[in-house]
Amino acid sequence: MPIASRTSKATGRHRDAVTLLKSDHQQVKAWFAQFTKATDQVRQGTLARDICHALRVHTTLEEEIFYPAFLESTGNKAVHHEAEVEHQAAERLIAEIEDSTPADDFFTARVNVLGELIKHHVREEEKPAGLFAKARKAGMDLKGLGAQLAERKSQLEAERREEAA
């Protein structure tokens, strides 16, 4: 379900940015778990495509909207730069996965390594003293950022649908 359609049932408003980003983390985590159990190459290929697409959208949202706001609000270059470097590493693996098929020798290894990289990245963002906690502590406008993230994600999903048509 696209972020844009996910709203708080209690308020009818978009969820905050951290909640939205964590929701993406959970979806990708579930797909990685399914990938490790999949034995059929068609299913592996579908899951890998879904993972790669979701991560491309997610990293775009963070890089365009959330990380710049985080850096501006906190001034914490170390945390910001580490997150950006982790994204760069993930983007290289994503490109390699997208350029291959489940029949390729290194396909499964690439997806598994990407899964480990993402697991580390998510831990860094979600841990009690991590990027998300620092964002909350800095008093970032997480509701406003959540609305921006939802709108941008909707745009990215619409672009993907247009490309597929």
Image: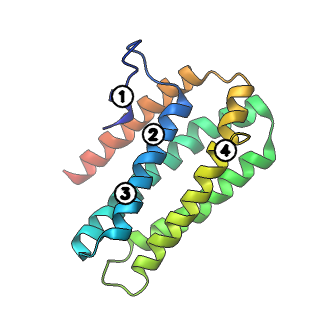
The kind of residue tagged 1 is Arg
Asked if the residue under mark 3 is in contact with the one under mark 1, i.e. CB atoms within 8 Å, the reply is no
| Lower position in the chain sequence, tag 2 or tag 4 | 2
| Lower position in the chain sequence, tag 1 or tag 2 | 1
Assign a secondary structure to mark 3.
helix
| Number of the front mark, 1 or 3 | 3
Asked if the residue under mark 2 is in contact with the one under mark 1, i.e. CB atoms within 8 Å, the reply is yes
Question: Which residue position holds label 1?
Answer: 6
Q: CA distance from mark 3 to mark 4?
A: 21 Å
Residue 136 spot, x, y in % from top left: 68, 27
* Vertical relation: 74 (above or below) 15: below
Question: Which residue position holds label 2?
Answer: 23
Question: Which residue position holds label 4?
Answer: 127
Assign a secondary structure to mark 4.
loop
| Total count of labels | 4
The kind of residue tagged 4 is Lys
The kind of residue tagged 2 is Ser
